Image: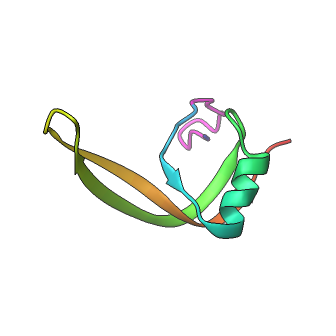
Amino acid sequence: MISLNQGEKVNSPSTHNIVAWGKTAQIVEKYVGKGKEVAIEGKLTTRSWEDKDGIKRYTTEVVCSELLMLGK
């Protein structure tokens, strides 16, 4: 992440729930692991479910339409 105010690089990793299908999912399975840098393009979706205790839970995911491998 680049700080626009001072032009210095800030290393603060983020994690997000990503959903991939088909060939994209196969590429992710084979080449992407923890700590790998990727750029994802897609749409945000929110879904809900009830857990075993009957509490309604929500999650937001990115449904991947484009994947770009970054870094080394």
11 or 47, which is in the foreground?
Answer: 47
In the image, taking residue 32 as reference, residue 14 lies left or right, namely left
Q: Is residue 62 visible?
A: yes
21 or 11, which is in the foreground?
Answer: 21
In the image, taking residue 52 as reference, residue 59 lies left or right, namely right
Relative to 23, is 7 above or below? above
Q: Is residue 70 visible?
A: no
11 is within the stretch colored magenta:
yes
Relative to 28, is 64 above or below? below
Residue 63: where, in percent of width, then height? 49, 63
Task: Give the magenta part as a residue range.
Answer: 2-12
Residue at image coords 80%, 44%: 71
Q: Main secondary structure of the magenta part?
A: loop
Residue 4: where, in percent of width, then height? 56, 44
* Image quarter (top left, top right, bottom left or bottom right) of the N terminus: top right
46 or 7, which is in the foreground?
Answer: 46
